[in-house]
Image (cartoon, rainbow, N blue to C red):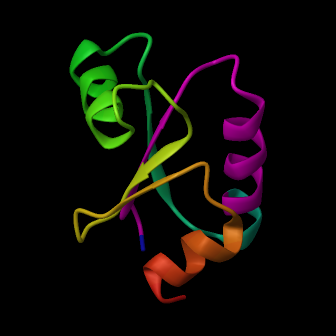
């Protein structure tokens, strides 16, 4: 599953830290992109969230996105 999920986050987001630790614990690999340092990613997150920069936003290989998902939702999206 290496690199199958992209997580758009910020350094100050507590929900991002929580989800990252849960995914780490479960062995779910992800690539993290800080939207504060990448304007294209910030624009992607806004498009996925009706103009809001809501994080964490996850992008899956299928092209589907989830915003502030639970670990169970991430697993379901990956069919783990």
**Residue 75 on the magenta segment:** no
Q: How many marks?
A: 0
Q: Quadrant of residue 23?
A: bottom right
Residue 53, position in %: x, y?
A: 45, 24
- Above or below, 27 relative to 39: below
**For the C terminus, which image quadrant?**
bottom right
In the displayed structure image, the side of residue 44 where residue 34 appears, left or right: right
Q: Which residues are magenta?
A: 2-23
In the displayed structure image, the side of residue 70 where residue 10 appears, left or right: left
In front: 43, or 80? 43
Residue 5, position in %: x, y?
A: 40, 59
In front: 49, or 76? 49
Q: Residue at x 60, y 73 (%)?
A: 73
Residue 63, position in %: x, y?
A: 22, 62
Q: Quadrant of residue 3?
A: bottom left
Q: Residue at x 21, y 21 (%)?
A: 40
User: Looking at this rendering, what residue extends furthest in the front direction?
Assistant: 50
In the displayed structure image, the side of residue 12 where residue 57 appears, left or right: left
Q: Quadrant of residue 60?
A: bottom left
**Residue 6 on the magenta segment:** yes
**For the N terminus, which image quadrant?**
bottom left
In front: 17, or 3? 17
In the displayed structure image, the side of residue 4 where residue 55 appears, left or right: right
């Amino acid at each position: 599953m290496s690199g199958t999920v992209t997580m758009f986050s910020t350094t100050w987001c507590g929900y991002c830290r929580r989800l990252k630790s849960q995914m780490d614990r479960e062995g779910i690999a992800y690539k993290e992109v800080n939207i504060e340092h990448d304007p294209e990613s910030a624009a992607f997150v806004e498009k996925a969230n009706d103009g809001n920069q809501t994080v964490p936003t996850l992008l899956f290989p299928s092209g589907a996105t989830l915003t502030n998902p639970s670990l169970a939702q991430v697993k379901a999206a990956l069919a783990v």
